[in-house]
Amino acid sequence: MTKHFFGDTATLLGRSLRHITRSPDTIITTAIMPIAMMLMFVYVFGGAIRTGSDSYVNYMLPGILLITVASGIAYTAYRLFMDMKGGIFERFQSMPIARSSVLWAHVLTSLVANLISLVVVTLVALLMGFRSSAGVLAWLSVAGILILFTLALTWIAVIPGLSAKTMEGASAFSYPLIFLPFLSSAFVPTDTMPGPLRVFAENQPVTSIVNAIRALFTEQPVGTDIWIALAWCVGILIVAYVFAMTTYRRKIS
């Protein structure tokens, strides 16, 4: 049964990846908005923002990476919605394949596409002056956090992708997720914010994830931020997975 699941998932993953290679504009579009934000904040606002960091691009890159993921998962919801409307799911149900492999193929496609976008954004940041003395272990830790974050948000994207009534509704959920980094330590220190906003910013998941990634990039002690970040990512992932699978079973029953 396990072998059946992995084989079916690999086959369907190949199908989804082929769709992406035929329309690479989805990855390009996903990367354009974060890159535009990065250019604007560094070259327009960067000189007026005091972060205590020598380079503003170094300070704000972790937040831009999270925004890249948040904008990329909208395409996951869109692709799921189109498959649902196109009757692909009903066609797969009539075939001898593992039912959950259909969803996992979309999730893994999202992971691959977002990792490519993250690499593109990081390369642009390097051209803009981003520098990190972090070692291989720190970079692998950053990659691990971003993978967990991508998986968590992707499973959230599965829910509207399966249940939305319109194409716009399927991807609209991503807007609050894109906006959330602006209410965190991603672009300015939280101690510059007014009281209620500061409390929210310091206790929402993006701040701990951004702080952990920033500390890893700068080889600073990560403290409890990395454990809080991992707890948020794993917790969101588990809850989103349960709700997504429940929605999927209801749809195909």
Image (cartoon, rainbow, N blue to C red):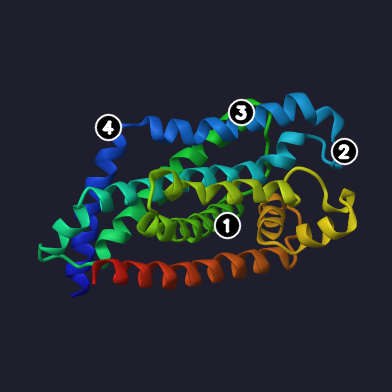
**Closest to the observer: 110 or 166?**
166
Depth check, mark 2 against mark 1: the one in front is: 2
Sort mark 4 into few (<14), some (14-19) or many (20+) by Cα contacts within 10 Å: few
Which is nearer the N-term, disc 4 or disc 2?
A: 4
Quadrant that contains the N terminus: bottom left
**Closest to the observer: 29 or 121?**
29
Q: CA distance from mark 2 to mark 3?
A: 21 Å
Residue 165, given in percent of the width and then of the height, sits at 38, 52
In the image, what residue occupies the spot 39% across and 44% down? 167
Residue 163, given in percent of the width and then of the height, sits at 38, 59
Whether residue 17 is situated above or below residue 140 in the rendered picture: above
Which is nearer the N-term, disc 4 or disc 3?
A: 4
Which is nearer the N-term, disc 2 or disc 3?
A: 3
Which is nearer the N-term, disc 4 or disc 1?
A: 4
Decide if residue 17 is in sight here.
Answer: yes
Residue at the extreme bottom: 1
Depth check, mark 1 against mark 3: the one in front is: 3
Query: Which residue type does callout 2 highlight?
Result: Arg
Residue 22 image label: 4
Quadrant that contains the C terminus: bottom left
Query: Which residue type does callout 1 highlight?
Result: Ser
Numbered disc 1: secondary structure: helix
Residue 141 image label: 1
Whether residue 171 is situated above or below residue 226 in the rendered picture: above
